[in-house]
Amino acid sequence: MESCTNAHKGARSGLLMILMSAILWGTVGVFVQRLYSLSEANPLSIGLFRLGIASPTLLLVCASHLGWQTFRIARRDLMLMLLTGAMTAFYQVCYFAAIGYIGVAAATLITLCTAPIWVAVLALVLLRERLSLGIFLAGLCAIGGTILLINVDSGAMTVQSKTTWGICLALSSAVGYASVTLCSRSLARRYHPLQSLMVSFLAGTIFLFPATLLTGLVFQYPLEGWLSLLYLGIITTALAYLLYFSGMRHTPATIASIVTLVEPLTSTLLAWWILGERLDTGGFVGGGLLILSIGLLYWEGLRQNRHASKKAKRCV
């Protein structure tokens, strides 16, 4: 009875930690937009500072939690972690740039809600996973939602260049995020999540540094700007990921994925409340379709899990 009670407490605390991490991630867009208004900040500079501040923080956490085990990494897995770091830097920079073109709400919805679709597509191509009806319908919803979020001039039937770049950047960010997800799946089987996360963030910082120097590293920020960068690095990156992976120890992956839908909801509400951004009727319908696509994917995952359980019972 006591172990059952402890399990329930662990499940509740896990859900709360994942919920908090999703809320923290949902504030990223507003702070990035604020940095744009306070300074001459560019996406590469913000991405570099965010990963650069988070990396030593995660290194301290990993060293205290894992000790020397933190640095015991096979060469093959180190290359995979470096790839994860490169794609982490890529998707963050694309997301920050997309915010500058199409705003927080649209950039967040397109990036986060199409990422699972890209995961399914990449898994189909790279891992030869079967494309089920549920995944196909989710893909249609994601494509339709993305189209509705694009600001189309009904008279000329043309898309503004600025909006087109924003959509492409958001979709590129989703591809990068999906690549990180697939790489993390492989690493999670052999390493503690914080270990691969720390190495990946450090690698992302190293990859971003020369690119940021070439395009113009922005150092001049007012006090509010530096506080925003510290918040992005420590709170929304190091702390948020720590909360998420800690919560995952007590929470099934499917439930955790559903809870993280609070992130785009938080971003959209904050963009509406603080930044005064607006979505028209088509935008709301498009956002709803994107979220519906996620729901279809999670339903498909549950269906496949039930099928696998029944097959295992028959074998026994």
Image (cartoon, rainbow, N blue to C red):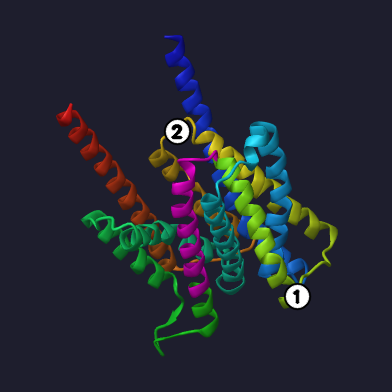
- Vertical comparison of 30 with 103: above or below: above
Task: For residue 186, say whether it is visible.
Answer: yes
- Give, as a three-letter code, the residue at label 2: Thr
Asked which secondary structure carries label 1, the reply is loop
Q: Which residue is mark 2?
A: 251
Residue 153 sits in quarter: bottom left
* Residue bounds of the magenta highlight: 168-192
Report the side of 296 relative to 102 (left or right).
left
Asked which secondary structure carries label 2, the reply is loop
Residue 157 sits in quarter: bottom left
- Which quadrant: the C terminus? top left
> Viewer-proximal residue, 275 or 3?
3
User: Which residue lies at the image location 45% right of the left edge and 21% below the top edge?
Assistant: 8
Numbered disc in front, either 2 or 1: 1
Residue 184 position, x and y percent, is 48, 49
> Viewer-proximal residue, 180 or 164?
180
Q: Is residue 241 magenta?
A: no
Residue 250 position, x and y percent, is 47, 30
- Give, as a three-letter code, the residue at label 1: Gly
Residue 46 sits in quarter: bottom right
Q: Which residue is mark 1?
A: 216
Residue 132 position, x and y percent, is 23, 55
> Viewer-proximal residue, 156 or 66?
66
